[in-house]
Amino acid sequence: MPTGFHFKQALTDQGWQQNVSVAVSDTGYFGTLVQDDNPNNYPEIAQPVVPGMPNLHSHSFQYAMAGLSEVRRNPVDSFWSWREKMYYFAHNVSPEDLHAITAKLYMELLKGGYTEIVEFHYLHNDLDGGYYATPEELSAAILSAATRTGLSLTHLPVFYAHANFGGVAPQDAQRRFINSREQYVRLIEALKSQKTGHNLGVAPHSLRAVTEEEMNWLLELRNDMLPDCPVHIHVAEQTKEVDDSIAHSGKRSVAALMDQAPVDKAWCLIHSTHLDDDEVAAIANSGATVGLCPLTESNLGDGIFRAVDFLAADGHFGIGSDSNICTQAMQELRTLEYSQRLLHRQRNILCSEQLPNVGSYLWQKAAQGGARAAGRAIGRIAAGHRADFVEVAFDQNGIMAAVSAEAVLDFHMFSGQKADISAVYVAGARVISDGQHPQQDAIDASYVSTMQRLAQKL
Ligand SMILES: [Zn+2]
């Protein structure tokens, strides 16, 4: 691994800077950035460089369904009918399948500009719902896929106990997700004992799946076993969830969550699609990150996040690929901006006076919010941060030569017709070169054979 790099153009905390040298430590962290003529003869990177993007929400097994549930089967298809299909599919995935799917997904996410994945993992049990002999059987399939592909993982074993508010008994279709408290403790113990190099956090699935009493228990367990680790939860993705929350407690979902849990900057509230004014302010004031998944939310017909109001309140957000319908960070961010344009009937909405270029603003904000949600020093090209970065390719036709550095991300995000990521580095090591992964053929082959069998289950 090189001891440093010289970037011709890099998106830093000061915006786009030219001719930046930076040392990288043995453990893969940036030293201080210096503008110079590369007196240390570091490898020079001519293409524009941006921070590696943390992906703050993924369910890796769902990648195998991407693009295969776009046929209307009901008078009105929705998130809920999609969920039925997803449950059915989840009943067929073995640990070997999960490894093959996850390795393929993570390789594609790397190519899409992501360098850290936060995996919200709720597939715990055997096909019939029984516990595996080792509780971490399926987690291990994911952790090994992350190690194999060279990206960094924050693994969130999900606690999932009920089918709806008020402790409604789980459905048979949810049998692979359900853990007793004792089994969940065994899972965390097993994962803690493995020295994988990856991080752990906890995730109450949702207010639907976890009662208030179970939430309190889980947060105490976190303090005992994984103090200060990230806490992620699905909330307010669907209007039905908000309605059910009101019917149960008289409070909307986010308001109920804020009342029952000490939400702070270690928390990430996934989706937060349906918010009233008080909830927008409450999340922003708590310091929590909102986990937006614009393409999954579009695909599932969830709704549109109140991004303008939330950013006006100085809220933090990052992006996740969630159902993994798409693996390109730029497309998630483009969809986020376009949702706001359609809603407000304006252009160039998500940007600031300091960063008026929408592409640069969205990339920087989402990278820093994703880092916050993962609880790691990542998401910035800055001293003390892990050397995760992405080279954005020049186009073949020379058009980029006429485009300023400030406009590079705008150009790729809003006009790119193909993948524009040429190289990706994690902790200073190059894991994607010329858009390719060194284990591509083997990973593709096992994914294809898995899909030949699983696609028939859809
Ligand atoms: Zn999710």
Image (tube, grey):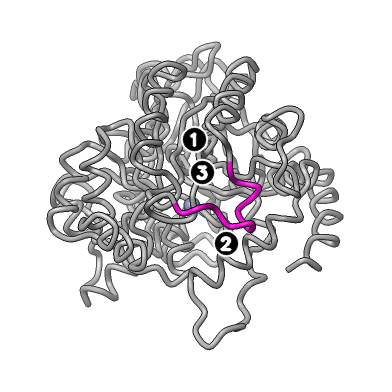
Among the two numbered marks 2 and 1 on one chain, the one whose residue lies closer to the N terminus: 2
Where does label 1 land, which residue? Answer: 389
Q: Secondary structure at mark 2?
A: loop
Is the CB–ligand 1 distance for label 2 below 8 Å? no
Q: Secondary structure at mark 3?
A: loop
Where does label 3 land, which residue? Answer: 160
> Measured from the top left, where is residue 40 in percent x and y?
48, 14
Residue depth check, mark 2 versus mark 1: number of the one nearer the observer: 2
- Is 238 contained in the magenta span? no
Among the two numbered marks 3 and 1 on one chain, the one whose residue lies closer to the N terminus: 3
In the rendered view, would you say 6 is above or below 247?
A: above
In the rendered view, would you say 133 is above or below 259?
A: above
Residue type beneath disc 3: Tyr
Which stretch is magenta?
Answer: 168-178
Task: Compare residues 401 and 178 and report the one nearer the observer.
Answer: 178
Where is residue 134, by image quadrant? top right
> Seen in the image, is 64 located left or right of residue 221?
right
Residue type beneath disc 2: Ile
> Measured from the top left, where is residue 221 in percent x and y?
43, 23
Where does label 2 land, which residue? Answer: 325
Task: Compare residues 58 and 168 and report the one nearer the observer.
Answer: 168
> Measured from the top left, where is residue 85 in percent x and y?
63, 67
Quarter in which the C terminus is drawn: bottom right
Among the two numbered marks 3 and 2 on one chain, the one whose residue lies closer to the N terminus: 3
Q: Are marks 3 and 2 in contact (CB under 8 Å)?
A: no
Q: Residue at x 64, y 69 (%)?
A: 67
